[in-house]
Image (tube, rainbow, N blue to C red):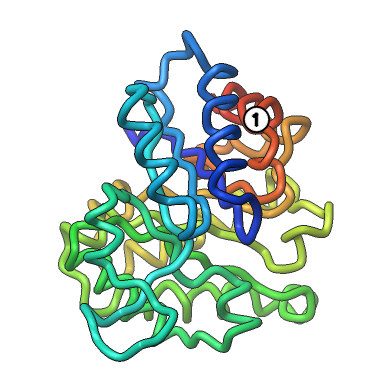
Amino acid sequence: MRRPLIAGNWKMHLTHLEALTLVQQLSHELAGRDLDRVEVAVCPPFTSLRTVQTVIDSDNMEFSLGAQNVHYEEEGAYTGEVSPAMLKALRVRYVIVGHSERRELFGESDEIVARKARAAFGAGLVPIMCCGETEEEREAGATEDKVERQVTAALRGLRPQEASRMVVAYEPIWAIGTGRTATPADAQTTIATIRRLIGDAAGADVAGSVRILYGGSVKAGNAAALLSPDDIDGALVGGSSLEAGEFAAIVRASP
């Protein structure tokens, strides 16, 4: 059984004090909730990681901590970058790599994303590797080609035990922050394709172990339907993760 994962990507929002308030509110909203069944992760900006890590530890919150990006080198003259070891020292468990905003706005290639995934595993982190197509690619029938290229590149060079632990997030670019959402059937079709591609590249056992999330305008009102298909193991949530009640409702909607 793959344990569902609901991860909140806070993007470039919230000061460290605002982040502290949000995670405390989220803990209150989910108090008494059995989080053994579903894993909840929060991914604040770098400036808030230490604050959120401290309150999670001191209050024994059942949340996993994630980061939104990482560099692929262990150290060096890379002004403004953050290494895998720096994140590991803050007890970060997950790191998002290859989010469409990193790919589209900052020019990250499939190879850069793959290097980040390998570096994350090398430091004991778990990458949440994002993939997805633009509206133009979708209309041209190129969704499968796009995700195949992204997934295959990310798996390259990973050992089977690493590949089986990687989290994949399918985020159609046309649905991110637009209010538009793939139908549950569309999301299941593409995510089933991703699972098949993983099986082709790394074997059936690995494909059966990898958790694949859906992301793209996930809200409390559509979460239950989007999370119901068999191949969908949770959600990577953007804007709706910034409001504790809304995000908690998405967690509760996880089957």
Say which residue appears at 42% left-offset and 51% top-offset: 49
Say which residue appears at 61% left-offset and 26% top-offset: 248
Q: Residue furthest right?
A: 179
> Helix, strand, or loop for circle 1?
helix
Reading the image, the residue beneath label 1 is 244
Indicate the amino acid at tag 1.
Ala
Quadrant of res 110: bottom left
Say which residue appears at 30% left-offset and 59% top-offset: 87
Q: Residue 243 or 230: which is nearer the viewer?
A: 243
* Residue 174 percent coordinates (x, y): 76, 67
Q: How many marks?
A: 1
Q: Is residue 121 left or right of residue 68?
A: left
246 above or below 164?
above
Q: Is residue 147 left or right of residue 142?
A: left
103 above or below 191?
below
Can residue 195 be spotted in the picture? no
Say which residue appears at 77% left-offset and 51% top-offset: 181
Q: Is residue 126 left or right of residue 167?
A: left
Q: Where the N terminus falls, by quadrant? A: top left
* Residue 16 percent coordinates (x, y): 54, 48
